[in-house]
Amino acid sequence: MVETTTKSKLYLQLADTKQSTTNDVVYCTKKFDIINPQYPEPVGYITLRVTENPAVIVYHGNVEYEVYKTFRGNGYAGIACQMLKEEANKSGVANLWMTIIPDNNKSIKVCEKLGAFYCGSITKGKMQRKRYKLPVVT
């Protein structure tokens, strides 16, 4: 369990670990529920793709998250990303890469608040993404 001492008392609870494949690259995926003990159910989830292989991180990133609609606007996504850095470090991942749909202003703001570096945009077919890099160890 990865915990934080912020006002929200959030913690990440491992929900699933599986082997995934993207572009013939095999890697481990760890999905965590974002838990706020004030609520009976998770407030969202965050996933770490344990890889730094460009075939995966360039288009998909190695972080995926969702804060469920009822719980949005509380800063949970940023807190969860910050907590995920510890798990990434334990797993040997040096950077968290986030790829964001260009009009997803809330996720872009999360990246900016975290201090992630904007690394340009990428287009693959109809898929467009802005790429952000968050060093795990600073």
Image (cartoon, grey):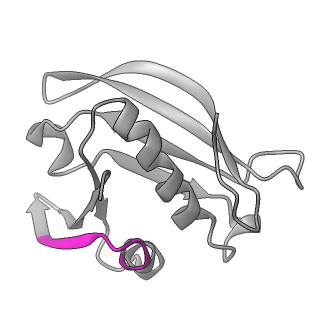
Q: Is residue 104 above or below residue 40?
A: below
Q: Which residues are magenta?
A: 112-120
| Quadrant, the N terminus | top right
Number of labelled discs? Answer: 0
| Quadrant, the C terminus | bottom left
* Picture coordinates of residue 133, whole percent (x, y): 23, 61
Q: Residue at x 19, y 46 (%)?
A: 57
- Does 100 sit left or right of 26 as displayed? right
Camera-nearest residue between 11 and 24: 11
The answer to if 74 sits in the magenta stretch is no
Camera-nearest residue between 55 and 87: 87
Q: Is residue 94 above or below residue 65?
A: above
- Does 21 sit left or right of 85 as displayed? left
Image quadrant of residue 68? bottom right
Q: Is residue 17 above or below residue 41?
A: above
* Picture coordinates of residue 53, whole percent (x, y): 13, 36
Camera-nearest residue between 68 and 49: 49
Q: Residue at x 45, y 73 (%)?
A: 110
* Picture coordinates of residue 54, whole percent (x, y): 10, 42
* Picture coordinates of residue 84, whole percent (x, y): 47, 47
Q: Residue at x 18, y 51 (%)?
A: 59
The answer to if 116 sits in the magenta stretch is yes
Image quadrant of residue 71? bottom right
Q: Residue at x 32, y 51 (%)?
A: 136
- Does 92 sit left or right of 23 as displayed? right
Q: Is residue 102 above or below residue 136?
A: below
